[in-house]
Image: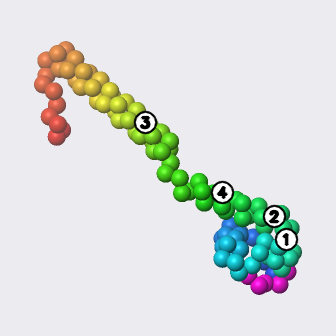
Amino acid sequence: MSNEPGDIKRWTARRKAAAVMDILKGKTTASELARSHGLAVAEVEQWFEDFVSMGTVALRSHPRDAEARHKAERKELLAKIGELAMEKEVWAIARDILGKPLPDANS
């Protein structure tokens, strides 16, 4: 990334990632990048640390997240089963009171 100092007005996430990748590939160093763009070395190093730490998070298997999703889905499905069971009971009570058969599944 051999740009002149100050030629990049806004460092987007994509530009920061490209800069970090250049550091990882050995094309430049944090010091060289900071100097060539008028940035603080600490800022570029923080980009690097953020990139690496978030990469680690993304590579986890997320077992707790999967378990939480499973529990939430199970809770939702059990609630729906309960709702349908109650609806069936209401229809049965209505049938007994009104003396009419339960509605057909297609109506």
**Colour option used:** rainbow
For the residues labelled 2 and 1, say whether their Cβ atoms are less than 8 Å apart: yes
> Is 2 contained in the magenta span?
yes
Residue 23 point in image, percent of width and height: 71, 74
- CA gap, disc 2 and disc 1: 7 Å
Report which residue position mark 1 lands on.
39
User: Does residue 62 appear anywhere in the picture?
Assistant: yes
Classify 10 Å Cα crowding around label 2: few (below 14), some (14-19), many (20 and above). Answer: few
Local SS, label 2:
helix
Query: Label 3's element?
Result: helix
What number is the disc on residue 53?
4
Pointer 3 residue:
71
User: What's the residue type where badge 3 is placed?
Assistant: Lys
Mark 3 → mark 2, Cα distance in angstroms: 41 Å
Residue stretch rendered in magenta on the structure: 1-6
- Amino acid carrying label 2: it is Glu
Q: Is residue 61 above or below residue 107?
A: below
Question: Which sits earlier in the primary sequence, circle 3 or circle 2?
Answer: 2
Rate crowding at label 3 as few (under 14), some (14 to 19) or many (20 or more) other CA atoms within 10 Å.
few
Query: Which of the marked residues, 1 or 4, is nearer the chain's N terminus?
Result: 1
Residue located beneath label 2 in the image:
43
* Mark toward the viewer: 3 or 2: 2
- Distance CA(mark 3)–CA(mark 1): 47 Å
Number of marks in the rendered image: 4
**Disc with the residue nearer the chain's start (4 vs 2):** 2
Left or right placement of residue 3 versus residue 105 in this view: right
Q: Main secondary structure of the magenta part?
A: loop
Mark 1 residue type: Leu
Q: Is label 1 in a helix, a strand or a loop?
A: loop
